Image: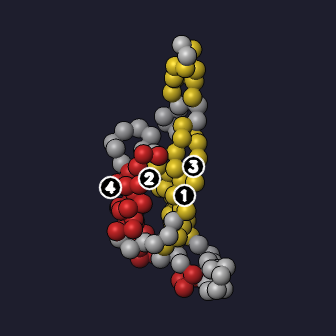
Amino acid sequence: MKMVTAIVKPFKLDDVREAISDIGIEGLTVSEVKGFGRQKGHTELYRGAEYQVDFLPKMKLEIAVLDDQVDRLIEVILETAGTGRIGDGKIFVTSLEQVIRIRTGETDVNAI
């Protein structure tokens, strides 16, 4: 089992969610986050004053999947979240030691 964490632009969230659903992945967790990488923020004007925005809004998606779903999930995220421009985000894949469904007590594959 793997945890796929994707950081994407906010306006891409609905496209990614729909594409993930289309390949049969049923659950994900979404968080509003802020951060920066190579993009390093940007300058904005507000009421005539210029100010630096260091942390840019992003969406963090966390998706627990079976090992055989990882490659397809990554492919779908790359296709739907990518714009070809700086700041498109990142995908992280980590191993899951154990998963437990709180309601039923099911574990591992049955809990996903």
> Gap between marks 2 and 1, in whole Å?
9 Å
Q: Secondary structure at mark 1?
A: strand
Q: Which tag is nearer the camera, tag 3 or tag 4? A: 3
Mark 2 packing: few (<14 Cα in 10 Å), some, or many (20+)? some
Mark 2 touching mark 4, by CB under 8 A? no
Tell me if label 2 and label 3 are in contact, CB under 8 Å.
no
Q: Which mark is residue 13?
A: 2
Q: CA distance from mark 3 to mark 1?
A: 7 Å
Q: Residue at x 38, y 74 (%)?
A: 24
Badge 3 vs badge 1, beta-carbon distance below 8 Å: yes
Circle 3 residue:
32
Q: Amino acid at mark 3?
A: Glu
Q: Position of residue 37 (x, y in %)?
A: 52, 39
Q: Residue at x 53, y 78 (%)?
A: 112
* Kind of residue at disc 2: Leu
Secondary structure type for disc 3: strand
Sequence-wise, the earlier of marks 2 and 3 is: 2
Residue designated by label 1: 30
Q: Residue 35: where, in percent of width, then height?
A: 57, 41
**Disc 3 crowd, CA 10 A, few/some/many (<14, 14-19, 20+):** few
Three-letter amino acid code at the position of disc 1:
Val
Q: Mark 2: which secondary structure?
A: helix
Task: Residue lying at the far front in this picture: please name it.
Answer: 47
